[in-house]
Image (tube, rainbow, N blue to C red):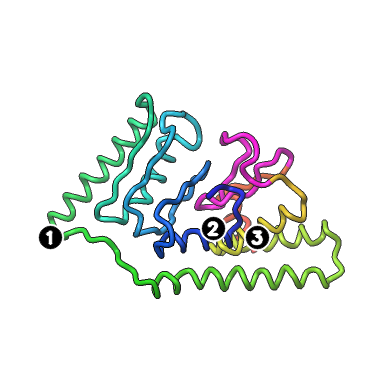
């Protein structure tokens, strides 16, 4: 799974992983925060010693966290050397683990993995499916409005920011992908992987990574939403 895959395909791929349709999912140049995947028991991070945005201590912690919901979850970092970012990430994860273990012991808690049935997985992802289908119908309706491409993009951008302010990130991601298609822009991920020009829509969803585009971080998005 890479950053050029749109929101609908991401949902389908992650659902396939959770349903056991395949055993391994390879992510390329991704930083997805908050993905709830309790079935994942192993995360392998290649080139963990390549310092940069995708291998900072915070990024390593976020990626490692994808295995945190499994009672036997583990993380393997492949590297030729231990970087400062790796040291900070390992130290922070160890600190959090000690706090959690102390809390569990004090309250008599025995950690267990979350087990969801196929029906539960299908139900949780069907909500996202419904959202993307609804947005697709809206996008099709724009073709009948007689608006120019520029006017359509402006309207979609407004709706994208409104969706982000309302914490509806699935809808915002679909709108973002349509804006890029109409703009004829390069897919996200082509070019530098540095943090320059890269803003994230809360949990890893990139807004713009092209020079010249107005870049809005999540704080500005939320501020914009509050002004209404």
Choose top left, top right, bottom left or bottom right for residue 176.
Answer: bottom right
Pick the residue in front: 117 or 52: 117
Q: Is residue 122 magenta?
A: no
> Which SS class for mark 1?
loop
As for residue 202 lying within the magenta part, the answer is yes
Is 184 left, or right, of 164 in this rendering? right
Residue sitting nearer the eye, 200 or 46: 46
The first of marks 1 and 3 along the sequence is 1
Which residue is drawn at the image coordinates 31% and 36% (left, top)?
A: 90
Residue under the image location 47 percent in, 47 percent down: 26
- What residue sits 27% from the left and 45% below the top? 96
Mark nearer the viewer, 2 or 3 = 2
Residue indicated by mark 1: 108
Q: Nearer the viewer, residue 154 or 76?
A: 76
Q: Position of residue 221 (x, y in %)?
A: 60, 54
* Label 2 sits on residue: 10
């Amino acid at each position: 799974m890479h950053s050029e895959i749109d929101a609908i395909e991401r949902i389908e791929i992650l659902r396939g992983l959770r349903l056991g349709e395949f055993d391994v999912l390879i992510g390329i140049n991704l930083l997805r925060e908050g993905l709830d995947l309790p079935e994942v028991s192993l995360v392998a991070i290649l080139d963990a010693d390549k310092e940069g945005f995708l291998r900072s201590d915070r990024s390593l912690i976020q990626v490692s966290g994808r295995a945190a919901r499994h009672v036997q979850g583990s993380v393997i970092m492949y590297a030729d050397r231990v970087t400062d970012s790796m040291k900070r990430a390992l130290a922070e994860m160890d600190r959090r683990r000690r706090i959690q273990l102390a809390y569990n012991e004090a309250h008599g808690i025995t950690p267990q993995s979350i087990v969801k049935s196929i029906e539960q997985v299908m139900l949780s992802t069907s909500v996202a499916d419904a959202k993307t289908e609804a947005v697709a119908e809206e996008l099709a309706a724009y073709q009948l409005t007689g608006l120019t491409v520029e006017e359509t993009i402006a309207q979609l951008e407004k709706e994208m920011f409104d969706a982000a302010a309302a914490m509806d990130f699935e809808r915002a991601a679909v709108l973002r992908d349509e804006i890029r298609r109409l703009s004829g822009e390069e897919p996200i991920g082509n070019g530098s992987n540095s943090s320059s020009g890269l803003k994230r829509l809360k949990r890893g969803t990139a807004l713009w990574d092209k020079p010249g585009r107005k870049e809005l971080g999540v704080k500005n998005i939320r501020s914009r939403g509050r002004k209404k």
